[in-house]
Image (cartoon, helix red, strand yellow):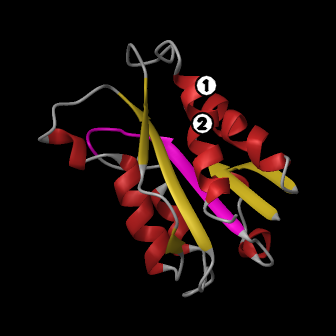
Amino acid sequence: MNTIIVYFSKFGNTKMVAEAIAEPLEAAGSARVISSDQLTASDLHNADLVVMGSPTHRMNLPEDVRPVFGTLPRRVLRDTPIAAFDTSYKMSWLLARFTAARKLDKKLRKLGGKQVVPPESFFVEEREGPLCGGEIERARVWSGSILHTFA
């Protein structure tokens, strides 16, 4: 299985989560972790799975992530399995629907991707981190649940 894990990370927390997500997926084939500013449409060709993550900034996608979607051709992910994650503060149930993961999921589906698991948030303690205890292991478990959908 050829997996691409795309991330944007300002303080390194999202990158650590992306790398943890890659670990279980490497057991099923190649799992390449790439920064969103380096992503090209050719990176997505022949991908069997695309996972994308970013921090939540002001209950939205960071400004640095938004232009990525304008550079990709329409339907570049046609029928490709996708999953989205973010790093954010723990939010009330009311605000939890305004996460970067949900917005990433919507954008990936608009490019033709098929959601295989619901969007997931991994939590940081303060604005710049660190990640809350146990979040790296939780990312590995979440990644395993993605892999399980292919079994």
- Residue under the image location 33 percent in, 26 percent down: 89
Per the model, the C-alpha gap separating discs 2 and 1 is 6 Å
Percent across and percent down for residue 139 are 58, 34
The dot on residue 137 is: 1
Q: Do the CB atoms of the residues marked 2 and 1 lie less than 8 Å apart?
A: yes
Report the residue that reaches farthest toward the left.
Answer: 94
* Mark 2 burial class by Cα count in 10 Å: few <14, some 14-19, many 20+: some
- Residue under the image location 74 percent in, 50 percent down: 34
The residue under label 2 is 141
Residue 45 in sight from this viewpoint: yes
Residue 12 in sight from this viewpoint: no
User: In the rendered view, does 110 fall on the left or right side of 10?
Assistant: left
What amino acid is labelled 2 in the image?
Val
* Mark 1 burial class by Cα count in 10 Å: few <14, some 14-19, many 20+: few
Percent across and percent down for residue 13 are 57, 26
Label 1 secondary element: helix
Percent across and percent down for residue 86 are 46, 41
Q: What residue range appears in magenta?
A: 49-59
* Residue 51 higher or lower than 69, as above or below: above
User: In the rendered view, does 40 fall on the left or right side of 105?
Assistant: right
Confirm whether the magenta stretch covers residue 76.
no
* Residue 87 higher or lower than 147, as above or below: above
- Residue under the image location 61 percent in, 25 percent down: 137
Label 2 secondary element: helix
What amino acid is labelled 1 in the image?
Glu
